[in-house]
Image (tube, coloured by chain):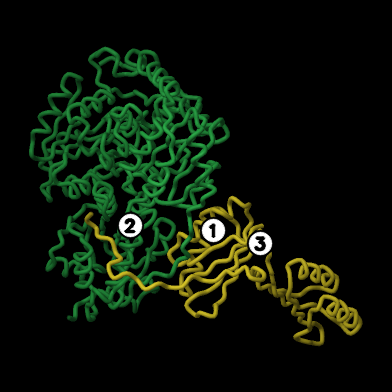
Chain colours: A yellow, B green
Amino acid sequence: MQTLVAYVENKPGVLNRVSSLARRLAINIDSLTVGPTENEEIARMTIVAHTDERGAHRLEASLEKLVDVLLAENVSTRALLERDLALIKVSADQQNRPHLMELIKVFRARVVDVAPESLIIEVSGTVDKIDGLLEVLRPFGVLEMARSGRISMTRGGDLLQPPVSEPPAPNSSPLAQT
Amino acid sequence: MKLTGAEILCESLTRLGVREIFGYPGGAILPVYDALGKSKLHHVLVRHEQGATHMADGYARASGGIGVAMATSGPGATNMVTGIATAMLDSSPVVCITGQVSSKVLGTDAFQEIDITGITMPITKHNVVVTKVEDVARTLREAFLIAKSGRPGPVLVDITKDAQQASAEFNWEASVPKLPPKRRRNNHDQAEFDRAVEMLNTAKRPVILAGHGIMVSGAMRAFEQFVHAGNYPVAMTLLGIGCFPANNPLNLGMMGMHGEAWVNNAIQEADLLIAVGMRFDDRVTGDLRTYAKSARKIHIEIDRAEINKNVKVDAALVGDAREVLERLTPHIETREHTSWVRHITELKGDSAVRDIQSLPDSGHLYAAHVINDLWKETRGEAIIVTDVGQHQMWEAQYYHHNRARTLITSGGLGTMGFALPAAIGAKFAKLDSEVWVVVGDGGFQMTMSELATIVQEKINIKIAIINNGFLGMVRQWQEFFYDKRYVATPLVAPDFAALANAFGIRGERITKRAEVVPTIRSARESAETVLLDFRVEQEDSVYPMVAAGASLSDMIRRPNNPLVETATEP
């Protein structure tokens, strides 16, 4: 599994170009998240792909060939903070509710919706942590689940910032005749 | 000054240096055609939009500039797909302009509406829909910039009819490209560079693999200096042919599936491969597990995505071929590699005796004879545009190109039907050059309608059909790998000479070897297009051949006497 971070133009069709590229390279995407950055013209993607280092290099380099991709970086080997968010609707009756609440506390998750027959639990953290919670919840009956997919950020001073625009040269288009 | 989008389009193309546009009109692009009539641009009316894209491609490849193709929405645009893909696979800078239905009805399945940007996403370097007249000039400038920069490729600009019809203030200076900011990678890795220099200076059996990138980069001089600095033998990819003179003793010829045995053997025996502007295509490497096993590898390539894609390399120098070569050459300590070069020359001698050209004339006409005679008669100076198949490989083997951009051929996609339209484009790019089409009877029948374009434009192209009555390359595979079961390869064709006459073009049929040179001479003397229908040996094969997926060392060699083994009674 390889993790890539990309900055892309925040406009229609870009997600299509990115996912279409992965399909073309026969790389299966495990999770892809997109969200705006502090600059509204730029969106940030975290792509988790089922591939090896060589495939990740190809994906990274091919992504950067797309005009709308500002930067793509394979961050798999870097010190990385990874987060996934999940909403889990689990069936809960009067009897097992206290037991559920205890588990939720252990996993530092929280209850965000209470109904007579069910609870919605919100949990964020690493994929392993969410998978772990899911495993202990399963015997209670998981009715529904939504996961956000991973977002990643390199730790500390290892910055990955979008490149900034340079003023274009006045005669920057080539001529058809050379 | 207020102009319509269509007028802005024509004005922008003129300012971008465009002279010719290859296209076909239709409803959704009509405003542009109306403006074209009032502009200085010359429009070449094609007979099928695939032809327009191949012409733009041929124009780009022959000139080193950018070719422009135009079509209407829907079927006009979809007919361009094969030509766009051809340009994509061979990194050819082509700008395609398509009309689109009005932005108000986009997405309603309006008449002749198709999502051409969706369709061409994987086969263009970039594509874009323009729905506002204000964006026309800037988008075109961006399209030209993208098509030509870095590793070139096709760009499609889809313009809605309302954007063509609406008016806006035209301000060229203000319409500067506004492309997203890109991270600038520092591609020069000193450690990698030093490692490459060390490999270059310690290699005993080096071979250069020269590709299309040398031409794209305009690195021919820098490459020649690099070659001579280290006295390196040079093997060419199909698209690399011409980037280094064939008459240079260090030029071995084409490598790969139909490369000469001495070339492939040299690669397999090498201790260093220096790949320049090429991408280790499967037609070049054969089975990767057995490919150049004793060689270390240096890859000079502008596209990072090509590094370690097919062949894992020991040093990757990412960058423009000319810049990298110019940086490398001063570090090369002269090495003679005398015994290595002598060894390859000996290999070459061994293959040469098998060569069909060394055999006596038995009266039969062979494609190799035709191409070899064409080479001699034109002194290797013509621009040859080939189609795809056996004749393409024979051209690569028997026509020796000394100059860049004189062989124009569809390599990556292998598009049949490419030759005739691409040659028309090449002729427009190089009006003073002699342009020959070398094409099979199969491929010619795919796009022969463009003969009418030649006549309408009154241009002078020579057409040599290598007519063997078969889809020859497929027949060859059936002979070698399917026990001679010739399914769907025998091919009926019209009388091509009579067909040419019907178009108002002189046509001749040639059946004997003795007739080849006189007909070529007489065709060359004509100021008009001439079509020559060479009826060649039907079941001749291209040798040597590395079967698909086989090792490069495992070549099917020429039979000792191909004239006897493959000739049929006249």
Neighbourhood count class around disc 2 (C-alpha, 10 Å): few under 14, some 14–19, many 20 upward: many
Residue B518 in which image quadrant = top left
Q: Which mark is residue A78?
A: 3
Q: Which mark, residue B148?
A: 2
Q: Chain of mark 1?
A: A
Taking the spot 39% from the left edge, 26% from the top edge, the residue there is B260
Question: In x, y percent, where is residue B59?
Answer: 24, 50
On whether disc 2 and disc 1 are found on a single subunit, the reply is no
Q: SS at mark 3? A: loop
Above or below residue B550? Residue A13 is: below
Mark 1: which amino acid? Glu
Whether label 3 touches label 1, CB < 8 Å:
no
Q: Nearer the viewer, residue B367 or B254?
A: B254
Please tell me in which quadrant of the rendered image residue A49 appears: bottom right
Left or right: residue B567 compared with residue B11: right
Determine the chain carrying the residue at label 3.
Answer: A
- Locate residue B84, reporting x and y percent: 35, 54
Distance from disc 2 to disc 1, alpha carbons, whole Å, reads 22 Å
Q: Measure how far apart labels 2 and 3 are at the Cα level.
A: 35 Å
Does dot 1 land on a helix, a strand or a loop?
helix
- Answer whether labels 2 and 3 touch (C-beta < 8 Å): no
Q: Which residue is mark 1?
A: A60
- Whichever of labels 3 and 1 marks the residue nearer the N terminus, that label is 1
Q: Image quadrant for the N terminus of chain B?
A: bottom left
Question: Amino acid under label 3?
Answer: Arg
State the separation of the CA atoms marked 3 and 1. Answer: 15 Å
Mark closer to the observer (2, 3): 3
Binning the other alpha carbons within 10 Å of mark 1 as few (below 14), some (14 to 19) or many (20 upward) gives many
The percent position of residue A164, horizontal first and vertical second, equals 46, 73
